[in-house]
Structures are given as structure tokens and as C-alpha cells.
Amino acid sequence: MGARIIDGRGFAAGVRARVAEAVGRLRSGHGLVPGLAVVLVGEDPASQVYVRNKAVQTREAGMASFEHRLAAETPQAALLALVARLNADPAVHGILVQLPLPAHMDAGAVIAAIDPRKDVDGFHALNVGLLGTGQKALVPCTPSGCLMLLRETLGDLSGLEAVVVGRSNIVGKPMAQLLLAENCTVTIAHSRTRELAAVCRRADILVAAVGRARMIRGEWIKPGATVIDVGINRIEEEGRSRLVGDVDFAGAAQVAGAITPVPGGVGPMTIACLLANTLVACCRAHGLPEPDPGRAEGAAA
Ligand code: NDP
């Protein structure tokens, strides 16, 4: 095994610590407490775990956490009314409606109802457009976390060849925009891409966001490349249940220069970036300078 293992768990702890420090300064200097409201509709078990973790980490960072749990059969109008109340609540700086929503709801309509200044998931069309036009946006948390890990690993990304496998609105597309803004040459691959292995082999930076266990093999990776594995796939292996990424870690680690493990790579960065976005939204709401918890003191770049 030659690759450096990128410690997302450790880096995320650093981001959370820097968020907590900035929250402490907001509280002592300005009497402000950033607040994050998380809305869960229904009882999806995975969503319940995410929402609980988000609330715990929000409080640990010194922020206010507001949890709203609605029954699965709640009418969409009631959810929209709650979003309108949260939009108007000055104690709430970030609003996250946990997806997926029950089938009778239109997720697009709910996202569109969130005040874009409080859209800490970065899914509102206004934030998507701001990101795409190089303006100040709230950026989706998972790709934002990937970029932090890439900057920490590589420093300046200018001119590097980046391949993003996956084109979802929550990971692949915003990841590509962020890499473009870092002056990478970006290719977005997807299920219709021809010669995917050859496309991946061009990449200095390979981001896998597919949702297929170990699809990307060691032979697809350019020697020395940095590999960011967003995938979270549960598989049964040797009689037990395991989480694995979209990249065949054992094979890829022989070839890559650096690689994120699953678990312990990108996963922990997502909530850390949610906290960072809530902090940023609070600072913007009050016209205060924005801290950058994504950059460690003395880091490359
Ligand atoms: P989506 O299902 O929304 O998108 C998957 C993408 O992969 C699509 O663009 C699809 O192409 C592409 N794809 C599917 N099969 C292939 C294939 N055989 N070859 C090439 N491309 C393919 O997934 P998400 O973006 O939401 O999530 C991706 C993965 O990341 C999942 O494992 C998810 O669990 C994980 N995830 C992890 C997070 C974290 O915090 N670490 C957060 C969010 C997601 P097409 O568009 O053509 O269908």
C-alpha cells in the first residue's frame, strides 16, 4: 500500500473545533448564537440517525439546535408553513429539511420555499446559480468537505485534471463547479460515459460519487492521483455487514498518491461543513466578517 490515507475524521474534528471557536467569539463579542433548524418528516431510520448526529454536533459547537419532527402523513402545506416560520425567525440562521421527503411531497417546492440566505444545504436554485457564476453562495456540504480535503492534501489545485464520477445535484455537479473555480480542468462522468476506466485514468483528482460498491478499480487510477471516495454502500461480506465506498480501496491504495477511506473520509466532513455553513449564514445575516473554518492554520494553499 503506497497511498497516503486522508484522515477525514481528524480533519472534520479540526473544522468543528474552529467553528466552535468562532461561535465563542460571536457570542462574547456580539451576543450572537448561530441557530440551525433541522426538519425531519417521517421515520426513515437512516434520516433519524443523521438528524440526531446533526443536533448533537450543533450543540457541541455551541450553536442552538432546533429540531422539528413531523409525521410522515403531514400535508405539504403544513411543512411549507413551518419553513415560512423558520424563514422569519431571527434565532434561526440555517434551515435543513432532511431528504428524502415522503412520496406525497415535492422536494423541489420545499427547497424553493427556504430563504436562500438560510439554505445551509446549498440546494436552492439561487445558491446553485451563485456557485455556478462564481459568486458568494452557500455551498452543498459534501462537495465542500471534499474540496477542503483536496486543498489540505494538494494545496493549489490549479491546472490539475479532475474527473468527477456522478452528476447528482447534491454531490457531482456542485463538486465539478468547485473544482472549476479552483482552476482544475474538469470532466463529469456518469452512467452514459463511454470508456469510463480510460476517463478516470486521466485524473490527477478523482472524485467518486456513484453509489456502487467498489466500482472504481485500482487499474482505473493514474499513479499518484488523489482519490476522494464519496460513496457509502452497505454490503454483506464474510458474514457481516460493512460500509464500503465506490472505490476498491485495497486496489486503489496501491496506485494512488492519497485516498480517503470509507468510513472515516468524506462522511464526517459533511456535518462539519453544515456547521460551517450555519456559522457563515449567521455572520452574513449580521454583516460580520466570515471565518473560514475549512482552512487549518498553516495549511497548504
Ligand atoms: P445519485 O444516485 O443521485 O447519483 C449517482 C450518480 O452516479 C448519477 O449521476 C449516475 O449517473 C452515476 N452512476 C450510476 N451508475 C454509474 C455507472 N455504472 N458508471 C458511471 N456513473 C454511474 O447519488 P448521490 O450523488 O446522492 O450519492 C452518490 C454516493 O455518495 C452514494 O453512495 C451516497 O450514499 C453517497 N453520499 C455520501 C455522502 C457523505 O456524506 N459522504 C453524502 C451524499 C451522498 P446518471 O446521472 O447517468 O444516472
Image: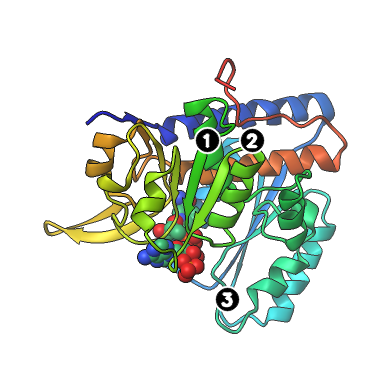
Left or right position of 210 against 171: left
> In this rendering, which labeled residue sits more in front, label 1 or label 2?
1
Separation of residues labelled 1 and 2 (CA atoms): 38 Å
Question: Residue at coordinates 53% horizontally, 46% vertically from top-left?
Answer: 270
Q: Residue 95: x percent and y percent?
A: 70, 56
Q: For mark 1, give the secondary structure.
A: loop
Q: Are marks 1 and 3 in contact (CB under 8 Å)?
A: no
Looking at the image, which residue is at 39% across and 35% down? 225
Under circle 3, the secondary element is loop
When asked about the image quadrant of residue 58, the answer is top right
Give the numbered dot on residue 160.
1
Q: Quadrant of ligand 1?
A: bottom left
Q: Would residue 183 appear left or right of 196 to someone viewing this image?
A: right
Query: In the rendered image, which quarter contains the N terminus?
Result: top left
Q: Which residue is mark 2?
A: 62
The location of residue 162, given as percent across then percent down, is 50, 43
Nearer to us: label 1 or label 3:
1
For label 2, the SS is loop
Q: Is residue 107 above or below residue 226?
A: below
Percent coordinates x, y for residue 255 in the rendering = 28, 36
Instruction: Decide which of 82, 230 is in the foreground and name it.
Output: 230
The residue type indicated by label 2 comes to Gly
Number of numbered discs present? 3
